[in-house]
Amino acid sequence: KAGVTQTPRYLIKTRGQQVTLSCSPISGHRSVSWYQQTPGQGLQFLFEYFSETQRNKGNFPGRFSGRQFSNSRSEMNVSTLELGDSALYLCASSFSPTDIANQPQHFGDGTRLSIL
Amino acid sequence: AQKITQTQPGMFVQEKEAVTLDCTYDTSDQSYGLFWYKQPSSGEMIFLIYQGSYDEQNATEGRYSLNFQKARKSANLVISASQLGDSAMYFCAMREGGNYGQNFVFGPGTRLSVLP
């Protein structure tokens, strides 16, 4: 079956703009998480959604937001972009957060965002 | 406090030899899961292997095995018969069980280079 699909793969924006990234989970997966990956900070958790509700949130400013639709697809939005937002943004899906300790997350290929 | 520690920023191994990537973790939960992911230079995160905190046997998946020592809180990844395609970043991750919505925590990663 199809894996996690993230669009777009690459994006170039300028400071002050906003951006929306999209993630389609594996069919049947209802939990979607977002991560930011940079060389300096590594993989940092942004937020997790399940059943259209944000279930957990990382330590990021309010400029970072997300949502999940009824078909489990998720979007992430970053407003007022800063140079430091340049990163690889990864989306991951899992079946559900219940019995979560043994549920691996399956990742998409990521969206590489560059801020000029 | 750092929940996942990977003390080897970089490792080299000769092709066809075995290699162990270290991971130690910190949790007070009784129920948790430990995961290893591989990230090639192309960026996608590939799930390799999972170990549950209650599993008595070490997990194995093909050439990957997890050396789980619960009392030491370590979950080292062993790759047998290394191949050139194993060159990548390797991340150890943990998800605590119990309360709904515990997010994944990733270690800083180890860059493995397989030499011909």
Image (tube, rainbow, N blue to C red):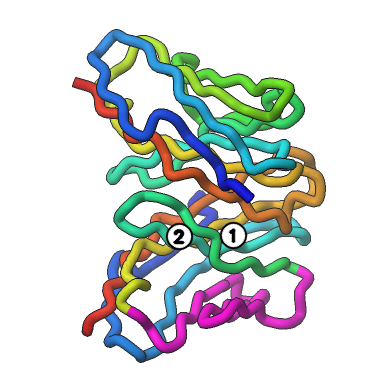
Image quadrant holding the C terminus of chain A, namely top left
Counting from the top left corner in percent of width and height, residue A22 is at 50, 26
Q: Compared to B68, does A98 lie above or below?
A: above
Using the numbered discs, state the Cα–Cα distance from disc 1 to disc 2 in whole angstroms.
Answer: 15 Å
Say which element carries label 2.
Answer: strand
Residue at the image point whose x is 72% and y is 37% from the top: A30
Pointer 1 chain: B
**Few, some or many C-alpha atoms within 10 Å of disc 2 (few <14, some 14-19, many ≥20)?**
many
Kind of residue indicated by mark 2: Phe
Horizontally, residue B12 falls left or right of residue B37, namely left
Q: Amino acid at mark 1?
A: Asp
Residues A46 and B99: in front is A46
Residue at disc 1, secondary structure:
loop
Q: Residue B57: say if magenta.
A: yes
Q: Pointer 2: what residue?
A: B91
Q: Which residue sits at x=26%, y=28%?
A: A114
Q: Nearer the viewer's eye, disc 1 or disc 2? A: 2
Residue corresponding to mark 1: B26
Most foreground residue, B65 or A63: B65
Q: Magenta segment, which residues?
A: B54-83
When asked about the image quadrant of residue A51, the answer is top right
Q: Quadrant of residue A63?
A: top left
Q: Is residue B13 above or below residue A100?
A: below
Q: Residues within 10 Å of mark 1 (few under 14, many from 20)?
A: some
